[in-house]
Amino acid sequence: MTALYIVLTASAFAIIWILSSNYRKKRKRQQVASQPFPKEWRQILRNNLPFFYKMPTDLQLQLKDKMQIFLAEKDFVGRKGQDITDEVKVTIAAQACMLLLNRGTDFYPFLKTIVVYPAAFITRHNRYDASGIQSEEPRVLLGESWNRGQVILSWTDSANGGADFEDGHNLVIHEFAHQLDGESGVTNGAPPLSAEQDYEQWAKVMSQEFQELQRKASTGEQTLLDKYGATNPAEFFAVATEIFFEKPQELKSLHPKLYQEFRQYYCLDPAEW
C-alpha cells in the first residue's frame, strides 16, 4: 500500500508540474505577444516581405504576435561570416510563422536554433558503397532541417523567398514544413493531424498525388509541384506546402483534393486572399 501511495503521489506531482509548466509558458507567451510590435520590424516587413500586406488584416496581426513569440524563444546563429541582424531574424520568422497561423501550436517545439549561412553551404554526409565501406560525400545545400533541434538556411535564398512570394519556391517554408512533419517523431510526410482531419483520407490523397508526381517526373511532363517532391513523401509534403502558400489558386485548380487536405491542415484558404 505504501509503495502504491508513493507511485500515485509521484504521478500526481508530475501531472501538476506539467500543468504548471504549460501554464507558465502560456502566460509568458501572452506577455510577449502583448508587447508593441517594434517599428523597425514593421519597416523590415514592408521592405522584405511584400506578401505580408496582401494578407487579411486579422492574419497580419496574428502573424506579428507569433513572430514575437518565435523570436523570443529561438536562437539564431551565423556561420561563415553571416551577421545575425534584425533584418535576418524578422525576414525568416515571418515566413516560418506563416505555417502556424490559425493553428494550435507549440511553436516548433523541437527546434532550438536557426543557423544562417550567407549563401549555399557545403555539408558532408556519410555514404556507403556496395561493399559497405563508408565515405564522406560533400553536398551543396540551400537549407536543411534536423530533428535534433536545428534548421539551417542560406540567407540569400531566405531573403529571395520573402521578396518573391509567387514563384512557387520558398526555402524557409520548405524547411519549416519539415519541422512540422517531424513533430510526429518521424519525418515521413505524415505530420500530426487535428481531430477534424481523417488520417485515412490524408494518406490516400497524399499517396495518389505523390505517385502521380513520380510518374510525371519519370516521363518529363510539366508539373506545378517541383519534381524534387518526387524524391520521397517528406519532400513531397514540403514542396506541396510551398505551392499551397505561393501558388494557391493553381493548386486548388489543378489538385483540388490536395488543396483541400492542406486547407484543413493549415486552417487557411490562401486562394481566397
Image (cartoon, rainbow, N blue to C red):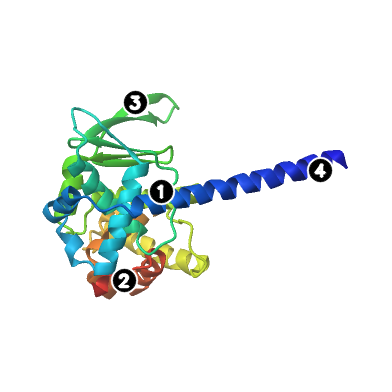
| Residue annotated with mark 4 | 5
- Residue contact between numbered discs 4 and 1, judged by CB atoms under 8 Å: no
Across and down, in percent, residue 51 comes to: 18, 61
Q: Which is more N-terminal, label 4 or label 3?
A: 4
Name the amino acid, label 2. Answer: Asp
User: Residue shown at 48%/57% (left/top)?
Assistant: 192
Camera-nearest label, 1 or 3: 1
Camera-nearest label, 2 or 4: 4
**Dot 2 lies on which element?**
loop
Along the line of sight, the residue nearer the viewer: 273 or 125:
273
Across and down, in percent, residue 269 comes to: 31, 71
Mark 3 and mark 4: Cα distance apart in space: 54 Å
Camera-nearest label, 2 or 3: 2
| Residue annotated with mark 2 | 269
Across and down, in percent, residue 155 comes to: 19, 41
How packed mark 3 is, by other alpha carbons closer than 10 Å (few <14, some 14-19, many 20 or more), is few
Mark 1 and mark 3: Cα distance apart in space: 30 Å
Camera-nearest label, 4 or 1: 4
How packed mark 1 is, by other alpha carbons closer than 10 Å (few <14, some 14-19, many 20 or more), is some
